[in-house]
Amino acid sequence: MQTSTVQNGPEAPAASETQETAYATDGRAAQRRSDTANLYELFTLEIIPCLGATMAKTFETSPKQFKNVPSKISATLAKLHYRTGNDEFYLEPGQRQNRVGPLLGTSDGIRDADRSGPFHEAAIGLQQAAVDFVQRSFDTGERQLRNAFRDAAKTLYAYLTNVEGAVANNALGRLDTHFADVVSVLSNAEYCGGLGLPPAPSGPWPRFGDFNGDGAVLVEELGHRAIADDLSTSVWMSAARFVAVQRIADYGAATLDEVLRDPDMDGDNRADEVINVAYRWWTAIRDNNGGAHLTSNGSPLLASAGPATTATPSWRS
């Protein structure tokens, strides 16, 4: 399946060699089809850029442990230290939220976050329709439930088409460079050896469904160090929870791409394929929230709640 290469906006700096390593395809697709799907994936994996300052401080204060780190990686760590919060391509968490929030609300990588915005209103409607279809008790009403999912997909499509474009592309450029630099360090054997841990893989990790235990343990360990150094700008997460967040990012981005590509989903097989991806998106969010999936108003979203409604969301009124 061919995918388009996302541009980082007209002002984005050229990719460094470390960034190219971090995004080696390794037989996988290198990008999503849409800027919005790419943006959702990076924003969901918000914990990754949050680790940059801790990684830099750990390096700078432990010269013996990191004496063999290549100069390119040490230069990247310097950027993560001195540019974060002071450069348009190295945003702090609050700056990222201010940039992406108007488009996608709060990051789905944050547990029990506010999901009352228009994006989540439409996304939750799609997820509920997938749950209703997959967890139905009988085959009766299958056609109606499938059509309800199509209706929810068209509602989400209407919102996404307003987001997709220059603003989403520009926001993606504000996140992509920072994210890639952190990943390039996490995949460097010499740096991770200084932590006493194996490196993350150099392929598409942590994106595109590349769930890797070594990478997840690195995220957990650096989160501990951020708390100890009082540098934490994000809630610490265990290795297991990080994998759940990766699933949210992967299945969520894939669902957005499928909805943008074909919201009508003519043919039952086509609709069932998208329902499967949307359902896995829902289960990943449920698992990240400790087994409880929350609606936009904070109440549990239950499979027994009945078919998804097709009420017009507030952003369309």
Image (spheres, rainbow, N blue to C red):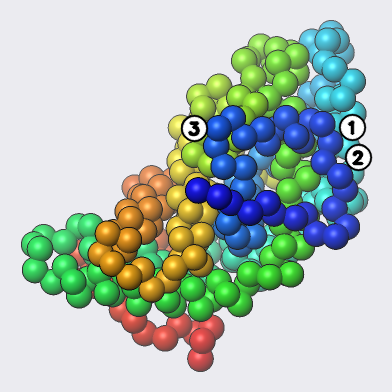
Question: Gap between marks 3 and 2, in whole Å?
Answer: 30 Å
The answer to the question of whether label 1 and label 2 lie on touching residues, with beta carbons closer than 8 A, is yes
Q: Amino acid at mark 3?
A: Phe
Q: Quadrant of residue 7?
A: bottom right
Which residue is tagged 2?
Answer: 82
The x and y percentages for residue 189 are 70, 16
Mark found first going from the N terminus, 3 or 2: 2
Looking at the rendered structure, the secondary structure element under dot 3 is loop
**254 relative to 202, above or below:** below
Determine crowd level at label 3: few under 14, some 14-19, many 20+ residues with C-alpha closer than 10 A. Answer: some
Residue appearing at x 88%, y 48% in the figure: 13
- Tell me how far mark 1 sits from mark 2, CA to CA: 6 Å
Q: Judge by depth and name the residue closer to the eye, 182 or 156.
A: 156
Q: Name the N-terminal-most of marks 1 and 3.
A: 1
Which residue is the site of mark 3? Answer: 211
Left or right side of 173 for 213: left
In the displayed structure, 64 sits above or below 125; it is: above
Q: To which residue does mark 1 refer?
A: 78
Q: Secondary structure at mark 2?
A: helix
Q: Amino acid at mark 1?
A: Ala
